[in-house]
């Protein structure tokens, strides 16, 4: 059996109350920090059909699909990349300003993150490409 | 050889399980014979695991491609150091390495009677034997490094070229050594909770093990980010990737554990043991994240059933620890009153904020998988989450770090604090006003520069005063500084760690707020003006060899006045073994900024597309990190204080 704890004195009771209030306050602050930051930073996956029905928006989303055969256009002078992403029967024109990603080729499966700027124009900030390799999740990120 | 390796692992698993039972029974019953038998079992398990390690090393160096692990991670073209690093390049090998470290530490604990109080040490040995048996069980059932191929291929796949970097040779062993090192204080803490023997000697031992583990984990994280910066080629050193986060979280809680232990009055020390256990569980969680593939990550090894076993083990240890903690809650703790403005309160807040940071980062890491499984909404959390959520906590933590050295134990009067803070604060304010005048207007940057410079100013000001008091001995200034430092090594070692933190904070803030990026398209002989530099394309190189197709641009970096500074060759190589392009960045490093050049592509018409990043003050991140490790090593190298009064970093003058 455990030794009985000493009878609580008013001072220790006060300290206990203070501790409880402190812990509750800290947990509340942490939850607020996590939730408020997550709201701003969360990027949702949508399908091309959903994206088009939502229309242009200031909020970034992720769309996945397959790079359409023969759709890749690369302008080295302006570092401007264009291609078409296909998901089922839906198509989406992607523009991306930056380096040409290593693994971008016809038929590659890609995830793009960015915003719809016109009814069929998606400005990508990030392109993730999946490739078959022994490192399963070795997707390269270019942003 | 595979039979020897697998057989010794199998035996080690059985022997460890026996050792756990024998040690626990011996400790419980006070049976010396059982304890002795258990200790012998621990030693033989260590020998068996060493045999398995040697067998795998032999197979790797013999390039025996009939073994799946050897085939997957080596090739005949590989340089020798990378053949060694193939040992921990894959899941099976790294688990074996971890088990090896644990078994050596368990043997060390079994052989050194001085490491802890006898009762705690006996149960701690049993706990370590359980961990050892668990890791060996995973290896023999789920993740056998000696699994063989029916038809041995002539050539192996070789190491992933991304891992062929000197820092990547050192990074994984450091991390696994730290995971192994954290298992010892965790075992001690569990034993302490179980037996109720938590005296001053117990806490000193716990603190020392915690600091060793913390040093290794910190070094591992630092080298990991250095590798990412040099090798991954996206211009940054920290991507808030789940695997990176998973190793940072235990480092934060481990830091919290170190700080609760410094406040050596019973008031806070009761948190040291639970925090130590939590830290080790978070290490296991990090292993789970890397192994399970539950969380998408660039570093993950892929899906396997190993993750489930880790999760089950974490759950069991957590339940056990919670039960022991609940049972020992009534243990008498002599609590001393400390005022709000005191070192004790400062240390408590430090520990709380560190735990808060760890929780926030953990929440961010788990947000995507939880949201997917609970709400069915596929979502990713951008890096901005971590900056937003952690910034207020980091500011509070650094501010506390700035003021804490000025706080006395028990009580500090506001007037006294104000008097001692005046000079350093004035320095920092003047510095920030100067920076403002120089055109730095970002509020976040100004706030953090103020706080970080205050940390440095307070520490150096205090040290300067100490050295000044020792000046009148006819010594050179360097001798005076050396003597002042040696007089309170532990204290000043800890302050070096804090100086390192201040430098790291400055480097992170500067490089993330003031990174600039340019996309350039150059032709041979053509130059581009960057602010302060000229970059000229001298040549392009395209060649093939047995391992890769190499594409490189030869660039000359000149100063604005046309003085030659360096030749830089960013590369983009297609490696045959993995059929992937690998970027090799080119770096020009100086104390002010890094010029970080990524080769985008060599076009058919001879044009070269480059991405040029300028990362200000990044080198101070590595300098600060080095200072941090050096400080911790200095603290460890000085003998642990005999009197508890000195455990607080040399503050011996206060009442016992």
Image (spheres, coloured by chain):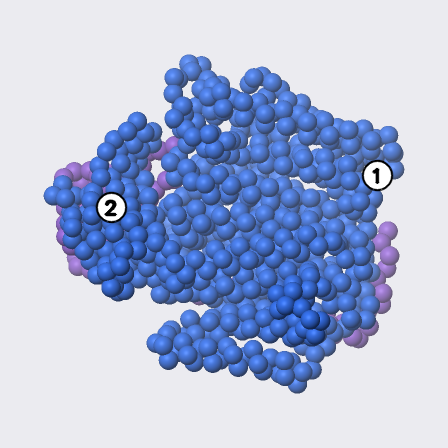
| Mark 1 Cα-neighbour bin, 10 Å: few <14, some 14–19, many ≥20 | few
Q: Hue of chain A? A: purple
Can residue A65 be spotted in the picture?
A: no
Q: Are marks 1 and 2 on the same chain?
A: yes
User: Quadrant of the rendered structure where residue B187 is?
Assistant: top right
The image position of residue B96, as x and y in percent, is: 57, 31
Identify whether B491 is placed above or below B303: below
| Mark 2 Cα-neighbour bin, 10 Å: few <14, some 14–19, many ≥20 | some
The image position of residue B514, as x and y in percent, is: 35, 65
x 81%, y 28%: residue? B37
User: Quadrant of the rendered structure where residue B466 is?
Assistant: bottom right
Disc 2 element:
strand
Q: Chain of mark 1?
A: B
Quadrant where the N terminus of chain B lies?
top right
Q: Which residue is mark 1?
A: B28
Q: Camera-side residue: B338 or B633?
A: B633
Q: Which residue is mark 2?
A: B554
Q: Residue furthest front?
A: B474
x 33%, y 43%: residue? B584
* Label at residue B98: none
x 24%, y 39%: residue? B551
From the rendered image, report the letter of the chain displayed in blue. B
Quadrant where the C terminus of chain B lies?
bottom right
């Amino acid at each position: 059996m455990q030794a009985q704890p000493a009878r609580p004195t008013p001072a220790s009771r006060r300290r206990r109350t203070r501790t409880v209030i402190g812990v509750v306050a800290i947990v509340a602050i942490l939850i607020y920090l996590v939730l408020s930051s997550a709201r701003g930073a969360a990027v949702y996956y949508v399908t091309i059909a959903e994206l088009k029905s939502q229309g242009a928006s200031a909020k970034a989303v992720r769309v996945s699909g397959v790079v359409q055969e023969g759709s890749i256009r690369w302008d080295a002078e302006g570092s401007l990349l264009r291609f078409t992403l296909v998901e089922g029967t839906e198509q989406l024109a992607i523009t991306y300003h930056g380096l040409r990603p290593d693994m971008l080729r016809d038929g590659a499966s890609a995830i793009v993150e960015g915003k719809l700027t016109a009814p069929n124009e998606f400005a990508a900030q990030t392109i993730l490409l999946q490739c078959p390799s022994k490192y399963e999740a070795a997707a390269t990120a270019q942003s | 050889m595979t039979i020897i390796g697998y057989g010794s692992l199998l035996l080690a698993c059985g022997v460890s399980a026996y050792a756990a039972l024998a040690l626990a029974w011996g400790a419980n019953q006070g049976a010396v014979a059982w304890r002795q038998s258990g200790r012998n079992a621990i030693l033989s398990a260590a020998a068996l695991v060493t045999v398995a390690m040697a067998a795998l090393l032999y197979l790797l160096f013999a390039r025996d491609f009939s073994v799946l692990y050897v085939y997957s991670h080596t090739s005949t073209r590989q340089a020798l150091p990378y053949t060694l690093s193939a040992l921990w390049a894959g899941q099976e090998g790294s688990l074996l390495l971890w088990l090896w470290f644990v078994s050596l530490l368990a043997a060390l604990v079994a052989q050194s009677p001085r490491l802890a109080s006898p009762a705690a040490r006996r149960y701690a040995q049993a706990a370590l034997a359980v961990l050892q048996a668990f890791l060996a069980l995973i290896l023999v059932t789920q993740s056998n490094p000696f699994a063989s191929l029916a038809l041995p291929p002539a050539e192996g796949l070789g190491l992933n070229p991304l891992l062929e970097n000197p820092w990547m040779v050192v990074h994984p062993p450091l991390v696994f050594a730290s995971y192994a090192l954290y298992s010892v204080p965790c075992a001690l803490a569990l034993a302490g909770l179980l037996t109720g023997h938590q005296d001053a000697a117990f806490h000193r031992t716990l603190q020392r093990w915690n600091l060793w583990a913390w040093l290794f984990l910190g070094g591992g994280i630092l080298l990991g980010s250095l590798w990412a910066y040099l090798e991954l080629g996206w211009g940054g050193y920290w991507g808030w990737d789940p695997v990176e986060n998973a190793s940072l979280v235990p480092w934060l809680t481990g830091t919290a554990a170190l700080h609760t232990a410094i406040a050596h009055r019973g008031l806070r020390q009761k948190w040291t043991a639970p925090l130590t256990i939590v830290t080790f569980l978070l290490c296991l969680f990090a292993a789970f994240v890397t192994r399970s593939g539950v969380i998408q990550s660039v570093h993950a090894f892929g899906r396997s059933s190993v993750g489930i076993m880790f999760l089950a083990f974490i759950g069991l240890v957590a339940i056990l620890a919670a039960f022991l903690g609940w049972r020992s809650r009534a243990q008498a703790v002599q609590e001393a009153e400390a005022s709000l403005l005191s070192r004790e309160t400062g240390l408590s807040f430090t520990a709380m904020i560190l735990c808060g940071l760890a929780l926030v980062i953990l929440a961010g890491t788990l947000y995507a998988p939880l949201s997917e499984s609970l709400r069915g909404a596929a979502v990713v959390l951008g890096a901005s989450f971590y900056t937003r959520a952690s910034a207020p906590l980091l500011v509070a933590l650094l501010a506390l770090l700035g003021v804490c050295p000025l706080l006395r134990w028990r009580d500090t009067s506001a007037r006294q604090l104000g008097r001692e803070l005046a000079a350093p604060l004035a320095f920092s304010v003047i510095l920030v006003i100067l920076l403002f005048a120089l055109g730095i207007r970002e509020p976040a940057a100004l706030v953090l520069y103020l706080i970080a410079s205050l940390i440095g100013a307070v520490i150096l000001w205090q040290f300067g005063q100490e050295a000044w008091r020792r000046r009148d001995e006819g010594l050179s200034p360097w001798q005076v500084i050396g003597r002042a430092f040696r007089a309170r090594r532990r204290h000043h070692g800890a302050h070096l760690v804090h100086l390192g933190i201040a430098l790291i904070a400055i480097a992170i803030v500067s490089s993330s707020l003031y990174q600039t990026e340019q996309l350039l398209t150059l032709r041979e002989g053509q130059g581009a003006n960057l602010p302060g530099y000229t970059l000229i394309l001298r040549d392009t190189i395209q060649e093939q060899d047995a391992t890769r197709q190499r594409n490189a641009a030869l660039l000359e970096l000149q100063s604005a006045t046309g003085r030659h500074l360096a030749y830089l060759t960013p590369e983009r190589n297609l490696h045959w073994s993995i059929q992937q392009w690998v970027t090799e960045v080119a770096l020009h490093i100086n104390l002010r900024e890094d010029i970080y050049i990524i080769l985008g592509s060599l076009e058919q018409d001879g044009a070269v597309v480059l991405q040029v990043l300028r990362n200000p003050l990044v080198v101070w991140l590595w300098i600060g990190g080095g200072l941090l490790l050096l400080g911790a090593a200095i603290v460890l190298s000085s003998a642990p204080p005999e009197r508890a009064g000195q455990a607080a970093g040399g503050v011996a003058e206060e009442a016992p």
